[in-house]
Each structure stands twice: as structure tokens, then as C-alpha cells.
């Protein structure tokens, strides 16, 4: 199994897309980080790890396999299903439309999706962004005997039949994948496009994230695709798709650590969103009872100076952790069912945070 690692000399982020054509010299591995990632190395589903400090990729490495069946290794351009890390892009799409004047965050969701039942009359787009809608989990409304994949529009149809919520909108917190599926539909309605096309034209292409996409089976192909796996009875089996894997707004984006470096860079300035929009996204908006998540913003979990989000789907476990004040970001994408990488990402970040103290 060939492994790779780059400790990069100072390099502007705009040059990241050319790294595959002009790879920097390979240098010795980092024993501390390698020890944390040992379980991902070898002939097993792997991981891609990126650490950005002051805008520079100071650690960038792949471990293990993107495709177990043919031995394709994880590379800097391997595209993983982001799962709920996708939510920050859905939120950004809504913010872009708000900047355009096409919608407002306090629009009732029924302005855009009028088929929702009366119980949704007071739910706003802001409620959906911060998981304050109280919507019933669409996963619990699905027919377990139906093996067909659901899409964002199917989530709407499931919720159209539920004239109840967990709590009055705006009066609680409950993480809602369905809320972000509805936001994707709102993006489509408000823009006159479709969600995947809007993301490509307004976010991915402007930022140079040329291999990132909201994947639609039969419509597009994922380049350099990493497939998801689960360890079952001591063997790795491909478990790349579930019945909910085709829902885009809550988790359907595929990306790589190289493309996500460009996304991270855009969150420090106004190349994509106005500073006021970024401030809204990163501000505590709803208190939660989740571990390490005192507050939720717009597609971001907020814990003190840390902004982060995990993504968990069948065969994938991912995390992005940002410390904007320290200009430090750790991104870890994995194509396996376990373990969750959040704790490892925090351990990696601490090495740089502790050194700065």
C-alpha cells in the first residue's frame, strides 16, 4: 500500500488545485498524527486529513483505501460523501439568496412550500437553519419495507401528512435533517434553478471547488469517488448507500480535503458571503443539549472559539473543526462506519493550539 504525506512550504490556496500535477516533495511522516490514524492505514477503508494554519496546508495526508475492491488509495482529491457537513453549504445558499434580496431569513417556510400543513404556519427559514422548527423526523415517517431512496421532494411529501411538531416552532432545539431538506427545496424555488445547480454556480465554481458536487445518481458522476464501508463480522463490506442517501439538503454533497481548503479560506473574507452573513452563520442562535455543542448557528455547531460540524452516514464519518481566532482548521474525511473522527480531530488541533500558548 502506497501512502503519501506532504508538509508544504508556504503556498497560496489558489494553487491547491494544481497539487496533483506538481506534487511537493514527500517528507517524513508525523509520528504523533500517524499514531492517531494508524487504524486507517493499510488495506482498509481510509481517511483524508488536512490541517490548515494561517491559510497554509501544514499537514495533508491520505491513509488506506478509497475503493477497497480494487485497491485505489485515498488521495488529496478523493471525494467523500460529506453527510451532515453538507449543512453549512445549504445554509450558505440561503444566505446568498438573502443577500440577493430574493428571500429573508424570517420568511415563513410556507411562503415557498405552501403544501406543508397548518402546523408549519409559524415555522420560518431561520427556524429551519437553527433546528428550532420542531418538525417530526422524516426518517421516522418512512416505510421500513420500502427500499427505494427518498429525495428532498419526498421529505416534503412525508411532512405534508404530519400536522404535529415536537414543540412549538422557535421554542426548542431538535436536530432536524428534514429541515435542511426543506431548505434545499426553498433554494430551488427561490432561485428558479435546482439545489445542485445553484450550489455549483454560486458556491463551488466561484471558489474553484471544481470537483465538489451535490450528487444525484443518474445525473452526474462523482470524480475520484471514495466508497463507504462498514465492518461486519470482522470484514469490510461496501455500505455506500441507504434509503436516505439521495437527500441533498441534509447531507448529499461530495468533496475532498483539497476542495474544502478553498471553502475554509472563503470563510475568512467576503469572496463569497458578506461579513454580516458570516457573522450570522457563526453566532450562537439556538442552545442545544448535545455534547460539545452549547449552541447551534447556521449549519455550524458552536463551542466557545470552535466552529465545527460532523457528518455521519452509512459508510462515512467526517468532521471539520475550525478555530477562526487562531486561523486553524482540521478536516478529517473517512469512508468507514466507525470510529467517529471528532475526538481525533480535536487531538490533532490541540498540538497546534497548545504550542501557541
Image (spheres, grey):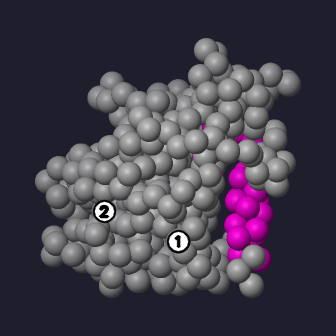
Q: Locate the N terminus and report the quarter of the image it occupies.
A: top right
Residue 78 is situated, as x and y percent measured from the top left of the image, at 51, 36
Query: Relative to 149, is 152 on the left or the right?
Result: left
- The residues colored magenta run 332-354
Q: Which residue is mark 1?
A: 54
Q: Mark 1 to mark 2: distance in Å?
A: 26 Å
Give the quarter of the image for residue 263.
bottom left
Other-residue count near label 1 (Cα within 10 Å), few / some / many at <14 / 14–19 / ≥20: few
Give the quarter of the image for residue 226.
top right
Other-residue count near label 2 (Cα within 10 Å), few / some / many at <14 / 14–19 / ≥20: many
Query: Relative to 91, is 3 on the left or the right?
Result: right
Residue 341 is situated, as x and y percent measured from the top left of the image, at 71, 53
Kindly state the secondary structure of the residue where label 1 is placed. loop
| Rendered residue at 82%/50% (across/down) | 31
| Rendered residue at 36%/34% (across/down) | 216
| Rendered residue at 50%/39% (across/down) | 23
Amino acid at each position: 500500500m502506497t501512502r503519501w504525506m506532504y508538509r508544504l512550504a508556504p503556498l497560496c490556496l489558489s494553487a491547491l488545485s494544481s497539487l496533483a500535477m506538481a506534487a511537493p516533495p514527500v517528507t517524513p511522516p508525523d509520528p504523533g498524527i500517524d499514531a492517531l490514524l494508524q487504524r486507517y492505514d493499510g488495506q482498509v477503508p481510509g481517511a483524508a486529513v488536512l490541517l490548515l494554519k494561517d491559510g497554509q496546508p501544514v499537514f495533508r495526508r491520505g491513509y488506506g483505501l478509497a475503493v477497497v475492491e480494487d485497491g485505489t488509495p485515498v488521495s488529496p482529491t478523493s471525494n467523500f460523501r460529506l453527510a451532515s457537513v453538507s449543512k453549512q453549504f445549504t445554509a450558505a445558499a440561503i444566505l446568498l439568496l438573502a443577500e440577493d434580496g430574493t428571500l429573508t431569513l424570517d420568511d415563513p417556510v410556507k411562503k415557498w412550500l405552501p403544501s406543508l400543513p397548518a402546523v408549519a404556519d409559524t415555522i420560518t427559514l431561520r427556524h429551519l437553519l437553527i433546528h428550532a422548527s420542531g418538525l417530526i423526523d422524516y426518517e421516522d415517517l418512512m416505510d421500513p419495507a420500502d427500499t427505494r431512496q427518498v429525495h428532498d421532494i419526498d421529505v416534503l411529501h412525508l411532512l405534508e401528512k404530519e400536522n404535529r411538531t415536537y414543540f412549538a416552532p422557535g421554542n426548542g432545539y431538535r436536530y432536524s435533517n428534514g429541515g435542511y431538506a426543506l431548505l434545499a427545496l426553498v433554494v430551488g424555488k427561490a432561485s428558479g434553478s435546482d439545489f445542485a445547480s445553484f450550489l455549483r454556480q454560486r458556491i463551488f465554481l466561484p471558489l474553484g471547488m471544481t470537483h465538489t458536487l451535490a450528487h444525484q445518481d443518474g445525473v452526474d458522476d462523482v470524480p475520484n469517488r471514495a466508497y463507504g464501508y462498514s465492518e461486519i463480522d470482522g470484514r469490510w463490506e461496501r455500505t455506500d448507500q441507504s434509503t436516505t442517501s439521495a437527500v441533498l439538503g441534509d447531507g448529499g454533497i461530495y468533496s475532498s480535503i483539497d476542495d474544502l481548503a478553498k471553502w475554509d479560506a472563503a470563510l475568512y473574507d467576503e469572496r463569497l458571503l458578506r461579513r454580516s452573513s458570516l457573522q450570522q452563520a457563526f453566532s450562537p442562535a439556538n442552545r442545544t443539549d448535545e455534547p460539545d455543542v452549547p449552541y447551534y448557528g447556521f449549519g455550524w455547531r458552536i463551542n466557545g472559539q470552535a466552529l465545527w460540524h460532523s457528518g455521519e452516514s452509512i459508510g462515512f464519518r467526517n468532521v471539520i473543526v475550525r478555530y477562526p481566532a487562531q486561523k486553524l482548521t482540521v478536516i478529517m474525511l473517512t469512508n468507514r462506519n466507525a470510529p467517529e473522527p471528532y475526538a481525533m480531530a480535536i487531538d490533532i488541533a490541540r498540538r497546534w493550539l497548545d504550542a501557541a500558548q
